[in-house]
Image (cartoon, rainbow, N blue to C red):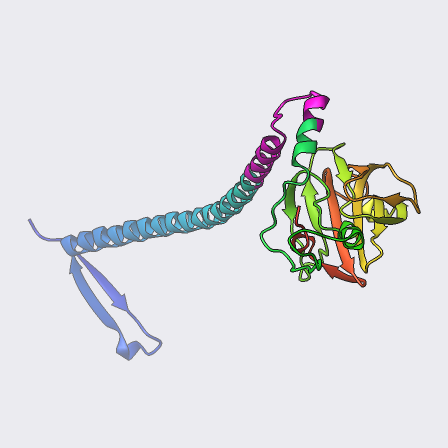
Amino acid sequence: MSRKYYTIQIIPENPEGAKKYRISNKQFTLFNIGLTLVAIILILFIVHIAKINRTLANYEKMRVHNAQLIKQNANYEELFSRLDSLWILENRIQNIFETFLENDSNKVNSIIERNRFAHVPSQKNSIDFEGIHNWLTTDEKIRMEHIPNVIPAVGIISKKFSFESKHLGIDISARKGNPVFASGSGKVVFAGNSGDLGNTIVIDHQNGYKSSYSHLKSIKIKNNAKVTKGDIIGYVGDTGNTSGPHLHYSITKDNVPEDPETIFTY
């Protein structure tokens, strides 16, 4: 059986350079098969590249989504941390009052009376009362009474004094309606609303010291009234710009703010 051949002729513009190629039927078939395989491989390559592009696109979406989840998780952790802090603070306050869910006002008042002078500061200013073995003259006792060294409410100091953060006083977290005491004897020079500080009392202790009590629920004394150390002058509240009931308490000495915790001795 004779073989079948194909002739391929390439004719350029110059006829003298014409070329002929003679291939057999078998060679032509192999060429077609090879061409088909190349086409299939090329198609598979294109499909694979498309899958890779889709995977990369999905990866970018997943990366962005994962970053969002991480940020959201961090927000949740911060919220849970705040809730834990509030829970701890609530338990500390409840432990101080020994009441937990106790609503007996007589029991609460007896605990307040027993503990209102129980604060022991971590640091104290050295104040010379010129007394010898606690034997003080009447004038010296009066002088001591006018020093604002008594913590004015039973509660937890939830925010410290700080020049850096411009918090020129301390915040004492306590139950709304708890009594607020005069930290020292003196004269009331202001008793009323003070804008963001809400209901506020300012006492001039007539020795360079002034103390102020803010965010009060109500005020018990009047302007220009004389008060004695330990007198109830108002009640803890949340008036003014505040996120919850507490007493904002500040002290100045010759109009210069001082950290109240360094002055407390009771």
Quadrant in the picture for residue 180? top right
The dominant secondary structure in magenta is helix
Q: Could you tell whether 18 is left or right of 135 in the image?
A: left
Vertical arrangement, residue 20 with respect to residue 221, above or below: below
Q: Residue at x 60, y 46 (%)?
A: 120
The answer to which of 219 and 42 lies nearer the viewer is: 219
Percent position (x, y) of residue 11?
30, 71
Say which residue appears at 8% left-offset and 52% top-offset: 2
Q: Residue 106, how many percent across, how many down?
A: 71, 22
**Picture layout, residue 46 above or below residue 164:** above
Which residue does the image show at 46% across and 46% down from the upper left? Answer: 62
For this orientation, the residue located farthest to the left is: 1
Q: Is residue 14 left or right of residue 97?
A: left
Question: What's the residue at 35%, 76% (across, down)?
Answer: 13
- Is 98 placed above or below 133 here? above
**What is the span of residues highlighted in magenta in the rendered image?**
82-109
